[in-house]
Amino acid sequence: MQEPVKGTVTPLASLFPPEEAQKASKRVQDALADRQSELDLLQGFIADNTALVNLVQRLPDELHHDIMVPFGKAAFFPGRLVHTNEFLVLLGEGYYAERTSKQTVEILNRRGNALESQVDSLKAMMKDLKAEVSFFDATAAEAVEGLVEIREDYVEESSSERVIERGPPKPDSPRFSGEDSMKVAAEDEEYARMMLRFDELEKEELAAGSGDEHDEDEHNEADVDHSLSQLSGDHVLGSLEERQVRKPLHHSKDEYATTEELLSKKHFEEDFANQLKSKIQLEGLKEQSVPKDSDDVSHGKSFANRATQSSSHGKDNIQALPTSKAETSVQSSKPATDSLKAFTGSIVEHTRNIQMNPREQAASSSQSSGSQPTKPVSRFKMQRR
Amino acid sequence: MDGLIQQKVQRFEEFVDRRLKPDLVHAIAERDKVFEQQEVFSNLRRNIENLEKNSVTSLQTMVNLGSEVYMQAEVPDTQRIFVDIGLGFHVEFTWSEALKYISIKEESLANQIQEYTRLIASIKAQIKIVCEGIRELLQLPAER
């Protein structure tokens, strides 16, 4: 992590020479001054408009008004304003409209709104220009001070697991200290392993083809369950729910709803508990808990067993649920579930599997976590028989 | 030697650009203004003569209230005219008085225009002199 990193040090002055920055700033200031004068002009128009509106409103109060009528630019005639409610308004391009006082006021109000919108846009432009000016000034000042820009190459993290776990690499995320980092590392490895296995399982599934959609679904769901259970089983620290919550967060591949996963996880636990119970009834106490191979995946099963073990320890109340209830609940949700919701199918399989293949599971439970399942699809079929 | 000449040339050029040319522009602008006023008064005179010719007693006009909003106005008696004589004053005239005033005004305006023309001419001459001097410095005197 402390390897020498290649980098470049560039003084800001070379990128933005101060004189040029100042010149640019000046240019922008000139543009700003232009805009300001335009703004003043527009505001003058607006003021004239409002004054005219007042005048137009007041004029109809009298029949005649005595005024000085201009005659050219340099002479006036004394006269009177007549027809005080008739106004001739220029609409533009040589078109006039004869309107009453109220109508003229409406026209003038509309003109005023147009002017106001122009003023607003001008103000926005001026704001941008001001920001530019301040930026240039700041840059010039910094360049004069001798501020330096440092660029360094980004060095990838050493452990690939970290990369997998983080998803989008966050090189700047602060390293947790002490136990936190260890815990994180352990979880990262766990997660990475789980992810790898998941990939493998998916590949196998795809390779095996869509033999039985049900099987596939179960397989998928089983994988998910296993990964979940594996996570929970391997980490005694923390609660299972915590793991579940973390898994969806980290897991970029599974877009399953977190609630679904939680639900499925609960069902899974329930199911395991039920299976455990049935196992106990059949064979004994501790031995059955071990060969609790609910899925065809052997190594996954071993983990699941461990998971259920820990879960069973932690949640005795779940065991109280009757097996049938779990199954019915599972089955009721089954038609609603897609391949995304694994448990229904897997739970059904589990009960049958346990009764049928205790020896297999005992053998498989001893397998390492990295071992691959030989033929998951076929096993399902076998188990079904 | 060359450096000195260059300096002199540059100084002359600067003088032309910074002093003489803006002065010229100013003078021309002032003269144009006076031209406009002259035009206004000649128009006025023509109108008054027209009124007199047709014996118009009353007028109906459109008065600009501002921002091109017009209103009808009536002038019942056109005998009296108020003419702007400058400095914000308007004098009440009859037609003949007005015409007399206008002719006097026009004379003074013409004088002003003449003044400005003279000024402009002198500025132009100065510019020409300086340019000639620069040319002499830069080129051989033989070239003329």
Image (spheres, coloured by chain):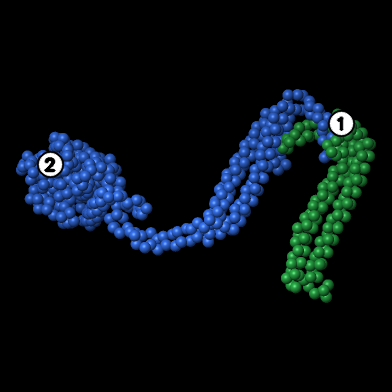
Q: Please, which chain is the residue tagged with disc 1 on?
A: B
Which residue is at the far top?
A62
Q: Please, which chain is the residue tagged with disc 2 on?
A: A
Report whether B73 appears left or right of A296: right
Report whether A68 appears left or right of A197: right
List x then y, in percent, for residue A260.
Answer: 26, 41
Marks 2 and 1: same chain? no
Report whether A129 appears left or right of A253: right
Residue pointed to by mark 1: B58
| Image: A146 above or below A348 | below
Q: Quadrant of the C terminus of chain B?
A: bottom right
Residue pointed to by mark 2: A275
What color is chain B drawn in?
Answer: green
List x then y, in percent, for residue A101.
Answer: 70, 29
Of A257 and A51, the residue lying toward us? A51
**Mark 1 Cα within 10 Å, few/some/many (few <14, many 20+)?**
some
Say which quarter of the image contains residue A338.
top left
List x then y, in percent, for residue A297.
Answer: 17, 51
Q: Nearer the viewer, mark 2 or mark 1?
A: 2
Q: Quadrant of the N terminus of chain B?
A: bottom right
Q: Secondary structure at mark 2?
A: helix
For the point 91% across and 37% down, which residue is it?
A: B98
Q: Count how many numbered circles sit on residues in the image.
A: 2
| Disc 2/disc 1 C-alpha distance (Å) | 116 Å
List x then y, in percent, for residue A281.
Answer: 7, 39
**Mark 2 Cα within 10 Å, few/some/many (few <14, many 20+)?**
many
Q: Which mark is residue A360?
A: none
Amino acid carrying mark 2 in the image? Gln
For the point 83% across and 30% down, which residue is it?
A: A79
Amino acid carrying mark 1 in the image? Ser
What color is chain A drawn in?
Answer: blue
Of A384 and B27, the residue lying toward us? B27
